Image (spheres, coloured by chain):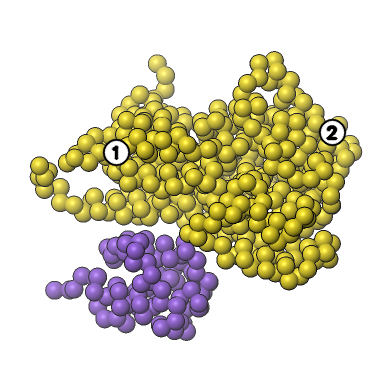
């Protein structure tokens, strides 16, 4: 799992949560909230989808790591199981 | 022998959901979609909690809940239910106020309120702008002790007319008062102001039927006529946890319970004091339940029509707004929810539901004869009030009926018949519940901000996330591990 792959997985989740948003031009370093109409319920949905799709648990104290695509990848990539 | 409403259920579920209000229904759906085995139990013969309906002879269908919610419902329904249900949500554009201080028609959104506050109420545009912006920025975690009344005085000092315009509709929506924390007003009002008031086209009956179909598709086992009497606990490895429920006299095992009952019912009756620390019990007992409601249901005879007088009409003869007067047994403040044929396309029928805020104690202490008399008075006064706007309405009514806080208590079992959940402090008790008793969760109308259609659905999802986390961890734990002694 590379950080680029991880960003793609997060974008996949967001595209299901917010199907009306244009995700083609998201800037990875900018906060998602500043580029998209995402509210706190949407971030909760991201947390639930990460658990459901990838078995990754994000504790409440770490929610701030989901702010931008870049911070998501930084935080989440090591949590993906390494393939044998 | 009585019919067994639990016939055919399994011995064990991941989660048992007690109660089918919108919070319980949404939780059940979300958790089933997460892959958990869900059993949903409702004591009434119909799902929906207060988001429900009833039918009467003459072809009448009456919706219970006040039919208006913020635009955020579209997004929540799409995400946690289905695109199909979300597409049935339509705007109600005719919101009307009639009282001794002002008469006003509005679409109940920020743009129109700003215009009318400036032009009609002569409030400086800068003040209105600052009020809306500050309200949007209010944060639950700020712990601001300011009350709604104090906040109004800060922006609109001495303007009882402006304060009435802002407060009256929200008092009907969530039962909050001028003495409650300003956040309880701010969140709900901001949600409405973003784009106006919306409703579900087709009525509560269609909504709940579509939700039921969705629940079944996702594998939720639904049982009505089933009253949960007790939540069962056991101490395992030194920790007390939920192991099941007793419902209709039968034991059902489960890993977790989500109670969509009132929080006081949940802690003090369903689980019981013995399962909690003395301090937590004291906190739960100290939670104040909110006020309640009366409703008058008026069915218009088939073939008759009503003129369009607005969708939601807030009326009152009180000289100024008062939270106390609003719940008085003899209040003159009423909201008329007008149901025209486009509410239920194809039926071509009209109904009127009159909502009146009320105190449980006023209605619970009446003799049977006194109770019947007061109900009839409520109906008569409501029809007389409606005649001011529709002079010949009385002759068109062929069904009239009233509900009181006692009716709400009977059908929902809510503590003290509340229709608006609890005051602010109820939220903390609700959120602390799982840390007090492992596997027990609560989602329901608490803290005022988690009330209403949107609040309760979103709270159901917030709690579902915690339950999902708990269940996933439980399922992952290797079962063969011997208990640590």
Q: Quadrant of residue B66?
A: top right
Looking at the picture, tell me which residue is in the foreground, B142 or B38. B142
Could you say where residue B458 lies in the image, as x and y percent from the top left? 49, 54
Could you say where residue B455 lies in the image, as x and y percent from the top left? 53, 52
Please tell me how many numbered marks the rendered image carries. Answer: 2
**What is the chain identity of the residue bearing mark 1?**
B
Q: Which residue is mark 2?
A: B384
Closer to the N terminus: mark 2 or mark 1?
A: 1
Q: What colour has chain B?
A: yellow
Could you say where residue B155 lies in the image, as x and y percent from the top left? 70, 61
Q: Considering the image in quadrants, where does the C terminus of chain B appear?
A: top left
Q: Residue at x 47, y 51 (%)?
A: B459
Give the class, few, some or many, for how many residues have Cα within 10 Å of label 2's Cα (few <14, many ≥20): some
> With B258 as the anchor, is B79 left or right in this view?
right
Q: Element type at marker 1?
A: strand
**What is the chain identity of the residue bearing mark 2?**
B
> With B245 as the anchor, is B101 left or right in this view?
right
| Residue B369 numbered tag | none
Q: Residue at x 11, y 45 (%)?
A: B484
Q: Which residue is mark 1?
A: B242
Task: Give the distance between the C-alpha atoms of the residues marked 2 and 1, in whole angstroms.
Answer: 53 Å
Could you say where residue A21 lies in the image, as x and y percent from the top left? 51, 74
Q: Considering the image in quadrants, where does the N terminus of chain B appear?
A: top left
Chain identity for the colour purple used in the image: A
> With B213 as the anchor, is B346 left or right in this view?
right
Q: Are marks 2 and 1 in contact (CB under 8 Å)?
A: no
Residue B194 in sight from this viewpoint: yes
């Amino acid at each position: 799992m590379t950080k680029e792959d991880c960003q793609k997985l997060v974008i996949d989740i967001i595209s299901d949560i917010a199907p009306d948003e244009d995700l083609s031009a998201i800037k990875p370093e900018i906060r998602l909230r500043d580029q998209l109409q995402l509210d706190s319920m949407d971030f909760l949905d991201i947390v639930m989808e990460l658990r459901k799709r990838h078995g990754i648990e994000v504790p409440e104290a770490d929610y701030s790591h989901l702010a931008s695509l870049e911070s998501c990848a930084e935080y989440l990539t090591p949590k993906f199981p390494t393939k044998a | 022998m009585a019919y067994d409403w639990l016939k055919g259920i399994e011995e064990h579920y991941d989660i048992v959901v007690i109660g089918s209000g919108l919070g319980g229904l949404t939780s059940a759906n979300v958790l089933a979609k997460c892959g958990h085995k869900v059993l949903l139990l409702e004591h009434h013969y119909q799902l929906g909690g207060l988001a429900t309906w009833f039918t009467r002879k003459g072809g009448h269908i009456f919706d219970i809940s006040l039919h208006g919610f913020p635009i955020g419902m579209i997004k929540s329904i799409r995400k946690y239910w289905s695109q199909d249900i979300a597409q049935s949500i339509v705007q109600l554009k005719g919101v009307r106020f009639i009282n001794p201080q002002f008469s006003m028609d509005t679409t109940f959104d920020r743009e129109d309120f700003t215009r009318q506050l400036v032009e009609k109420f002569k409030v400086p545009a800068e003040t209105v702008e600052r009020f809306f912006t500050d309200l949007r920025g209010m944060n639950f975690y700020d712990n601001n002790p300011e009350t709604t009344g104090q906040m109004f005085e800060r922006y609109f000092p001495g303007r009882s007319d402006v304060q009435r315009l802002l407060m009256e509709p929200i008092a009907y929506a969530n039962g909050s008062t001028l003495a409650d924390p300003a956040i309880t007003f701010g969140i709900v009002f901001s949600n409405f102001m973003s784009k106006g008031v919306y409703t579900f086209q087709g009525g509560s009956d269609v909504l709940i039927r579509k939700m039921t179909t969705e629940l079944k598709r996702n594998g939720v086992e639904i049982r009505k006529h089933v009253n949960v009497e007790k939540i069962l606990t056991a101490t395992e490895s030194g920790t007390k946890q939920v192991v099941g429920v007793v419902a209709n006299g039968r034991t059902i095992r489960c890993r977790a319970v989500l109670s969509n009952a009132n929080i006081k019912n949940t802690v003090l009756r369903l689980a019981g004091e013995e399962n909690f620390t003395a301090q937590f019990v004291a906190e739960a007992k100290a939670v104040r339940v909110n006020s309640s409601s009366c409703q008058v249901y008026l069915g218009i005879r088939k073939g008759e029509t009503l003129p369009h007088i607005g969708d939601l009409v807030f009326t009152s003869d009180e000289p100024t707004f008062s939270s106390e007067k609003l719940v008085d047994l003899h209040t003159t403040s009423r909201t008329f929810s007008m149901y025209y044929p486009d509410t239920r396309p194809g039926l071509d029928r009209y109904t009127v539901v009159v909502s009146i805020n009320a105190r449980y104690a006023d209605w619970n202490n009446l003799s049977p004869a006194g109770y019947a008399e007061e109900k009839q008075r409520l109906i008569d006064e409501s029809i007389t009030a409606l005649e001011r706007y529709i002079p010949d309405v009385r002759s068109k009514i062929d069904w009239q009926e009233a509900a009181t806080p006692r009716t709400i208590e009977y059908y929902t079992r809510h503590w003290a018949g509340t229709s608006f959940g609890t005051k602010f402090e109820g939220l903390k008790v609700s959120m602390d519940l799982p840390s007090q008793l492992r596997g027990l969760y609560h989602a329901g109308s608490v803290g005022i901000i988690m009330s209403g259609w949107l609040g309760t659905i979103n709270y159901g999802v917030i709690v579902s996330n915690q339950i999902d986390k708990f269940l996933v961890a439980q399922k992952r734990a290797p079962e063969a591990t011997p208990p640590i002694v």
